[in-house]
Image (cartoon, grey):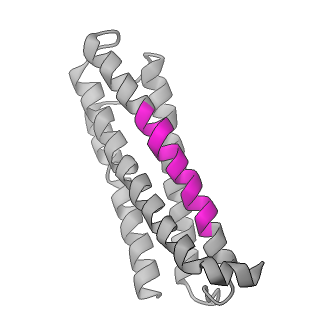
Amino acid sequence: MTDYLIMIYPWVKAFHIMAVITWMAGIFYLPRLYVYHAERSQPGDARDDVFLVMEHKLLKLIMNPSLIAVWVLGLMLIMTPGIIDWSSIWPWTKGIAVIVLTWFHMWLAVRRKDFAARRNTRTGRQFRVMNEVPTILMVIIVLSVVLKF
């Protein structure tokens, strides 16, 4: 198994990066949709229905599959021998940031259900503030992996 992981490592890494890009695009866009949904529509109006469809498709068709791919491919990278020096700090900071980013994804999914049930209580401003969370986490993840501190 480990020989196989070493052999396919470049492919796994390439697909992991593509999955991360796709996931992050959704992570950045969904809170922005929530801002507009909260500020520019009322429950049951035509805009509300359009936002609900957009949010549902983004989460279910793009973000969720990307999240699964990121985790599966990332775990394959972790299991590849010689790739990670566990005595360094960077795999731990990256891992914690990825777990928090996954929590944020789940938080966004719950907010989508709130909109769908017509019980959103958050403002556009609150969603704008939450939209900064993935940026901070992305910085931590990229610096951890590239600088390997």
Q: Nearer the viewer, residue 62 or 98?
A: 62
Magenta part of the chain? 57-74
Task: Kindly give the residue lying farthest to the right in the view shown.
Answer: 1
Q: Position of residue 126 (x, y in %)?
A: 32, 38
Q: Tell me, yes or no, whether the highlighted magenta stretch contains residue 98.
A: no
Q: Nearer the viewer, residue 61 or 34?
A: 61
Tell me which corner region of the image, top left, top right, bottom left or bottom right, holds residue 33: top left
Residue 17 appears in view: yes
Q: Nearer the viewer, residue 46 or 38?
A: 46
Q: Position of residue 89 (x, y in %)?
A: 55, 84
Split into 4 quadrants, where in the image is the N terminus? bottom right
Residue 121 appears in view: no
- Which residue is depicted at the point 41% across and 63% down? 137
- Which residue is depicted at the point 59% across and 52% down? 68
Q: Is residue 113 left or right of residue 137?
A: right
- Which residue is depicted at the point 34% across and 9% down? 44
On screen, residue 135 above or below 85: above
On screen, residue 148 above or below 100: below
Task: Kindly give the residue lying farthest to the left in the view shown.
Answer: 40
Considering the whole magenta stretch, tell me its main secondary structure.
helix
